[in-house]
Amino acid sequence: MASAARRDACCTAPVLSFRESAVDRILIFKLTLTPLLVLACMLITRRWGAFAGGVAAGLPVVSGPLSFFLTLEQGAAFSAQASYNTLLGIDANGLAAVAYPWLAVLGVPWYLAIVLSLGIYFLGGWFVQFLPHWPLGAVGLSLLSPLLVLACLPRQKARAVPQPQSHRWLMSVQMAFGSLLVYVVTEVAHWLGAGWSGILMFFPVMICAMVPFIHATQGPWAVVRVYRGLMAGWFGCIAFFAIVMALVESTPLWFCYALAVVAALGAGAAVSIVQKRKAGNAAS
């Protein structure tokens, strides 16, 4: 029996070593990728303005890699269920997306506005988990959410707003926060379960990293423009997670995520073009 146990240990040791090295590579990759994506969105905001930054931030720049890592670490079935809950998380985030701009316009300082809107997000995330399991319904509700947010946002005629000054230390904090969230959610997914893992996959990382800074430096109406851009990006998120939910268990992983990325970029670009044309027609 002792010799058999030693043989089993010898056989399992290389497997465990391989898994540990794979997990280490995944961890290094995700901790490197996320801050670079956050930085890219911040640079887009500085170069092309709040709306363009909002579009980029609304795309699954954090939640997409997070979904991929969850699939590698927890399996396709877990990822499909988490993607379903992510679609529900979009509805929870929609409540917060209405709350923050209105709080900003009403004069609430950024540090209170972000705390209150996050509280609304977590309350909504808790509530949507009690909805009956209905994948098509989740897609439909998630599509309705950004439309309702756009209809409920405060309205003001466009005006020139000064661009924010460079604060490299703050950008570093924003990048570190994005990495921290991706790390925490993927590492605790085994006890969070697919429900909250999916909800937190759409945690407003980019909102927390960008909006308070823009609120403090450019004012409340720049916040409104960011959220209009975010809604265009959200349609890309919906396309991404609807495809992952539908295909991750039945197609090769590379094909599923490649198709999801293409769909996300296409949907986000199409909606942003429509919004810009409407804004141009309204201005004229």
Image: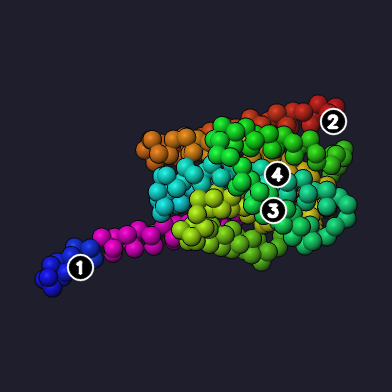
Colour pattern? rainbow
Pointer 1 or 2: first along the chain: 1
Numbered disc 4: secondary structure? helix
Numbered disc 2: secondary structure? helix
Magenta stretch containing residue 264, yes or no?
no
* Kind of residue sitting beneath label 4: Gly
Q: Between marks 2 and 3, how big is the CA–CA gap?
A: 37 Å
Work out whether residue 105 or residue 162 is closer to the camera in this orientation and state it: 105
| Main secondary-structure element of the magenta-colored stretch | helix
Q: Between marks 4 and 3, how big is the CA–CA gap?
A: 12 Å
Mark 4, Cα crowd under 10 Å, few <14 / some 14-19 / many 20+, is many
* Residue 51: % across, % down: 72, 42
Q: Going 66% across and 66% down the picture, which residue do you hit?
A: 169
Q: Which residue is mark 2?
A: 283
Q: Which residue is mark 3?
A: 123
* Kind of residue sitting beneath label 1: Ala
Q: Which residues are magenta?
A: 15-42
* Residue 75: % across, % down: 40, 48
Numbered disc 1: secondary structure? helix
Work out whether residue 199 or residue 210 is closer to the camera in this orientation and state it: 199
Pointer 2 or 4: first along the chain: 4
Mark 2, Cα crowd under 10 Å, few <14 / some 14-19 / many 20+, is few
Q: Which residue is mark 1?
A: 9
Q: Going 46% across and 46% down the picture, which residue do you hit?
A: 79
* Residue 225: % across, % down: 77, 43
Q: Between marks 4 and 1, how big is the CA–CA gap?
A: 51 Å
Dot in front, 2 or 3? 3
User: Up-down: is 154 above or below 40?
Assistant: above
Left or right: where 281 falls relative to 141: right
Mark 3, Cα crowd under 10 Å, few <14 / some 14-19 / many 20+, is some
Dot in front, 1 or 2? 1
